[in-house]
Image (cartoon, rainbow, N blue to C red):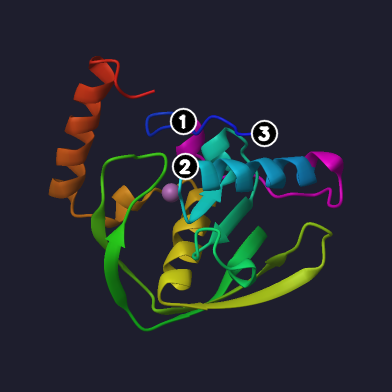
Amino acid sequence: MIRKIVKYGDPVLEKPAGPVTNFNTPELRGLIADMWETMYAAKGLGLAAPQVGISLRVAVIDTSAGEDESKKFILINPEILNQEGMQVGEEGCLSIPGFREPVKRANLVRVAGHDESGHRIELDGMELLARAMLHEIDHLHGILFLSHLSPLKRDIIRRKIKKLQKAGEWD
Ligand code: NI
């Protein structure tokens, strides 16, 4: 089932999500299945549960946009173990549609987390995957990519979004 993607301005996007404590449940599997469907329908490379209004530490990532099954990753209760290097690249967010800006991120990242059965996993990412992992983990902390921009750029985007909200074009 495709769920509604929550847009910037909804408080659920800016509060830390809670940990998953029950694995292997129909609710968790259903949430993840819906998140895949919602992400692909919106043509995103990643989606975090708060973006569908669920404040849980769950994210899905597919940097191949559905082209390569081996590029699909589920992160549950992820923790960053290590970050190295630096990359700058354009970033967008399904909750902030229409805005893309260069964001500085680590180039290599190692993350520990759990799969949907509760097994501990470790995942290494580099370049685009590292960027996606860090962007989604930020979401689980209630942080949006706007936080990584200069205050000036952030204010410009916020003002544009406010105008869209007033015009009823941001929902
Ligand atoms: Ni995002």
* Residue under numbered circle 3: 1
Most distant residue in the front direction: 67
Lower position in the chain sequence, tag 2 or tag 1: 1
Q: Is residue 25 above or below residue 117?
A: above
Segment colored magenta: 11-27
139, 68: nearer the viewer? 68
Q: Amino acid at mark 3?
A: Met
Q: Quadrant of the C terminus?
A: top left
- Mark 3 residue element: loop
Cβ of mark 1 under 8 A from ligand 1: no
Q: Secondary structure at mark 2?
A: loop
| Rendered residue at 23%/15% (across/down) | 167
Residue at image x 73%, y 72%?
Answer: 121
Does the residue at mark 2 contact the one at mark 1 (Cβ under 8 Å)? no
Q: Residue at x 67, y 76 (%)?
A: 122
Image quadrant where one finds the N terminus = top right
Name above or below for residue 171 compared with residue 107: above
Q: Is residue 88 magenta?
A: no
- Give how far apart the Cα atoms at labels 2 and 3 are: 13 Å
Q: Is residue 117 left or right of residue 115?
A: right
Q: Identify residue for label 1.
A: 11
In this rendering, the label closer to the viewer, 1 or 3? 3
CA neighbours of label 1 inside 10 A, class few (<14), some (14 to 19), many (20+): few
